[in-house]
Image: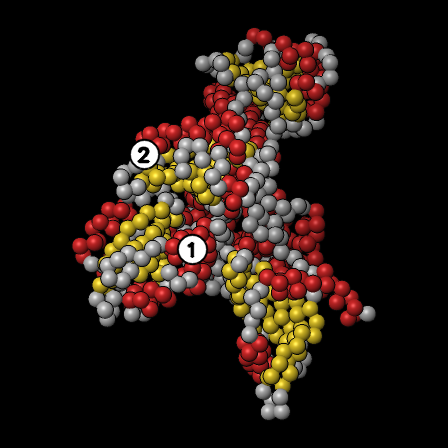
Amino acid sequence: MEYEFYKRILEQCTVAYSLRKVVFDKTGTPCDVIIAEANEAYFSLAKELKPVDTAVWLNKYGNLLKNSNEVLSEILFLSPLKWYRVTSWSPEESFVLTIYRDITKEKTDKDKVNVLLNLHTELLCITDTKANFVDVSRRLEEMLGYSQAELERHNLFDFIYSDDVKSILEIIETINIEDEIVNFSFRFLTKYDGYKRIKVRGFKKNHLFYAFAAEAKDNVLRDDSSIDIGLSLFFDNVSTQIWYLTDAYTYGKANKAHADFVGLSVSELENRSVLDVLKRDEAEDCIESNKKLFASGKKIITEEWRTNAKKEKRLLKIIKSPVFNKQGKIKYIICSAEDITENKAKEEQNLIKENILNAIVTFSRDTVDFESLSRTIPMSLELLGQTLNMDSAYYFQNKYDKSSEEWRTSQLYVWNRDCTEIKNNPPDYQNVAFSKFTEFVEPLSKGKPYGVNVKDLSEGVTKNHMVQNNVKSVIALPVFVKDVFWGFVGLHTCKQEKKWNETELTLLKNYIQVLSKTIERIELDRELENINRTLEKNVSEKTSIINDANIATIVALAKLAEVRDGSTGEHLERVSAVSKIIAEALRQDSYYNIIINDEFISSIKVASLLHDLGKIAIRDSILLKKGILTVEEYEEMKQHTIFGAESLKSVYKSYNNIYLKMAIDIALSHHEKWDGSGYPYGLVGDDIPLAAQIVAICDVYDALRSKRPYKEAFAEDIARRIILDGKNKHFNPAIVDVFIKSLPAINKIYETHQTSA
């Protein structure tokens, strides 16, 4: 049963699998290899593979059986260009089990270029923009007589005849466009035979220069067909679309990426009219651009919307470069295109994020009383409206009318795109009864945002009013102050219907949250002033409320940092809840129960929310980067600990309480490590504040258990093992022990709180 079960899985698996029996002769030497078992994926793979000499397998498997080791290697096949990770081991005597996994998607364009470096006969080298060797082919070593180590210790120009260096520099410096191909020749110094003249075809990509070269004899330059083969193999295996045009209307050749984009084969594109390939309007724009290039002889870089074979509109960055003949006339145009649709959309979304976050931070910083509120709300409404491409943004405030015994609302501020100034208390919308806009007020009064396209509204007063004012789409978000429906912020557009995405809604909700807490703080400030005039004994109590309101405002700002780097805010809530659990458990240890009391536990629950407050000061280009940070970028990222602590210190000067004092320690030191390898100051052991030690392990565990754009969430057992591996290195061993014992309670937090990015 078990064998049949696993066999069925292997048969359906997309990973290729084979089990081979190695046959030995009387002397114990491997003499044959027999396939004992294999799945369908293996036989499909075998059809693509070039047959391998049996002697190779005998040597490979004979050594494996002799040494009883697992062998991991990579195999490359050129047609089609694919990489496989191959794992082999012996499950029992005389048998070898092998797994093949296709890892082509993990390879980059540079990996494909390195194929040419190592497997093709044409001379090929890669240098940086200062002509330092990055990589050289074996063929280059053979031709010149130098080893790779000898070459890489020098600059390319050290091996070139001095009279040729200046002209080569001039050519390379004129290459301003990536993927533009240039041709030149130079005399290269060999180790034993003097100078040889070389003809080179090269191009620049990602700040590197790729040179395909062919050796020439007796100063007669060799035909460059071998170079073309190398270039063809490279260009047909990159995602960049490449093609050339023989005139303004006609294709020459194109690579597979471009052919796939337009929905034709490479051969079908050759000598075909642009008018037959592109949509009519796109073709006409393309031809007009081509004519201008043929007339001017200058490179053109454009961003154009093109329709692909799936009828999808894609934004392409297109580069067109002329190639001249010996008479100085344009022979053909080389074109390349990169699909930048997603990058452009991300840039626009990031710009929206940055502008709205700036509006929120500025609003919170500059609003200190009701007088300043009358200035900062209109400013933030204008920035919200312009950033989100709205036609109007407004703020309404509610009030209970005792005479009519009903709630009413009044528009205090409004920004309109077609108006040059903000209007305060416009007369049209003052003291309006809730009953006139029931469809809006009901969800808002329950704390829910209300967004709708006007055409979808039911017939009535609300829809008629919107239609009369040419409103197409509207959204309103409620403002609550101390659990009272205080008012709402609304935005609408008159040009087209609007569909709100999650990023925009999250940012707007954060703006509303900061607005609510700011009004609450100002209200409490005003209330405190009145209390001071009449009742001195209540000052202490109300001051505490003010401090809590300020903490709430700071926590709201801290959540903005989570929004900026793609988190939902649940991260802060989980770290807070788990920190409290660990502090309570650690309190049972006699060593720590002197430090950890009720005040410590209540403080860490709040203070831990502010651990990444400093990320607000980190640039989006670093905070949102999905790749590996450079050394400089990482150093800047590490500064968020100092930024956060300094920001909290400035607040602590005015509102000193235990929460803020602990929050300063946590923000500054939650990236310190027990063994001293952390930052910003490399503190060791108990020199790290205890609260920061607790939050550090909770922060790391949450990062492991959470889904991010660049990784899936780790399972509990894997996250647990990583935490244990950090014992005595990253984390205080006593806290690790308590953390592991508390996992049942901690995991309940993860069952009730989402862990998506």
Name the quarter where the N terminus is drawn: bottom right
What residue is disc 1 on?
Answer: 229
Element under disc 2:
loop
Quarter of the image holding residue 585? bottom right
In the rendered image of this protein, does residue 645 appear above or below residue 412?
below
Q: Is residue 668 visible?
A: no
The chosen color scheme is secondary structure
Element under disc 1:
helix
Closer to the camera, 212 or 408?
Answer: 212
What amino acid is at disc 2?
A: Gly
Quarter of the image holding residue 295? top left
Residue 454 lies, in percent from the top left, at 66, 18
Closer to the camera, 82 or 610?
Answer: 82
Give me the residue at 25% from left, 66% from top. Answer: 190
What residue is disc 2 on?
Answer: 297
Q: Quick check: 8 left or right of 469?
A: right
Name the quarter where the C terminus is drawn: top right
